[in-house]
Image (spheres, rainbow, N blue to C red):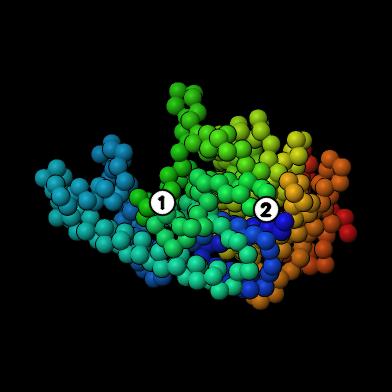
Amino acid sequence: MKILFVTDIHDALKELRVLLSSTEADLYLLCGDILYHAFYDEDKIYQFVCLQEEFYSEAKQLDRKIMPYDLATEMLRYPERFKNDTEEWNLKAAEYRMLFHKAGKTMKEKYELIEELIEKYSNASCFMLPGNYDIDLRYTRLVHRDLHHKEVDLNGLKFAGYGGAPIATSGIPEKLAITYHESRENGNLYSEPEEFFEHCHPDVMVLHNPAYGFFDRVPTIGHVGSPGIRNYLDRQSASLVVSGHVHEDYGIARKKDGTILLNPSNFGGVDSPYGWQPGGIFAEITLNGRQFEKLVLRGLDGNQIYDFLEVTVQGEELKARALKDLEKSHLDLSGFVRDHAGQPVELFS
């Protein structure tokens, strides 16, 4: 079975069209963050983000756990509860609600365009997973492709997905986004993704937020992945675990139980505190039954697709072979392939 895994698309819809029309696969996994902006207009993006942050800040000042949209609605309905600068806040509340609905409409239009691209150019089954820059796909034309908190059987393999991430994302309508149900209180962890995967025991786990300790390290912060998913993987094995979300920590690894974990890096370009990170990267994965057979790390630049690395399993270890276009990659691929201990595997020609 050949799978094309594309993660963190970030509104790169022109590039997605090229990829779909230029590749062949048995399955396309197009995963969050599918979108990047809730508006086409940069001024509206800035305006919405600023108002959203103001309402988050006001909720904190009021010592209330309430979403910006709900706080704005309450201010308009019950102005007597908010005595300071009521007229100013009412104007902000009305503006925020208007932009919120405009954002939702614009994002749904983008998802509709993606569905049209898939229908026109894809030659295979296609499933999607929302990230923290997406709204819940149940509200969109992509609902029949949604893999969040769902499982599906394909070619004798069980695929299951859990999207979103435990982070509030500025500029995205917060009430429409996936809620990532994982928290720790008094030392006790509750993890919905852990419970979900424990229930379905998939062969292929499709994630946005990675498992703790696997391709989840952010510079100056450390590991940000899911402890619940890590707990599950410490108890159970899977053929393949694919994730994205963390753009600074990408690669492939094989656990001692044979589980392959992969974050190929982002397909769409993205701004970050560490500078602009170009995209275009995706993974072609070959499974032979439940067994991982091969990964080809590929890149798209304009209308040209390049092949950078081939990774196979030899015995108990991953082996990496440099392909003809390796030097064209903008990524540092010296540590892309890692052993059981997380140490880089040397590439060979």
**Amino acid of disc 2:** Asn
**Which residue is pictured at 60% across the width and 57% down the height?**
29
Expressed as whole percent of the image width and height from the top left, the position of residue 288 reads 77, 51
Q: Is residue 149 left or right of residue 290?
A: left
Image position, residue 24 (x, y; %):
69, 67
Mark 2 residue element:
loop
- In the picture of the structure, the residue carrying the numbered disc 1 is 177
Which residue is at the front of the view, 157 or 240?
157
| Quadrant that contains the N terminus | bottom right
Query: Residue at coordinates 44% horizontally, 27% vertically from top-left?
Result: 185
Which residue ends up furthest to the left in the rendered image?
80
**What is the spatial separation of the Cα atoms under label 1 and label 2, in whole angstroms?**
31 Å
Residue drawn at point x = 25 percent, y = 47 percent: 71
Relative to 51, residue 219 above or below: above
Q: Residue at x 64, y 38 (%)?
A: 213
Q: Camera-side residue: 40 or 233?
A: 233
- Tell which residue pokes out farthest to the front in this image: 156
Q: Residues within 10 Å of mark 2 (few under 14, many from 20)?
A: few
Residue 138, located in which quarter of the rendered image?
Answer: bottom left
Q: Position of residue 119 (x, y in %)?
A: 54, 70
Callout 1, which amino acid?
A: Ala
- Can residue 216 be spotted in the picture? no
Q: Is 144 displayed left or right of 280 in the figure?
A: left
Location of mark 2 (residue) = 155
Under tag 1, what secondary structure?
loop
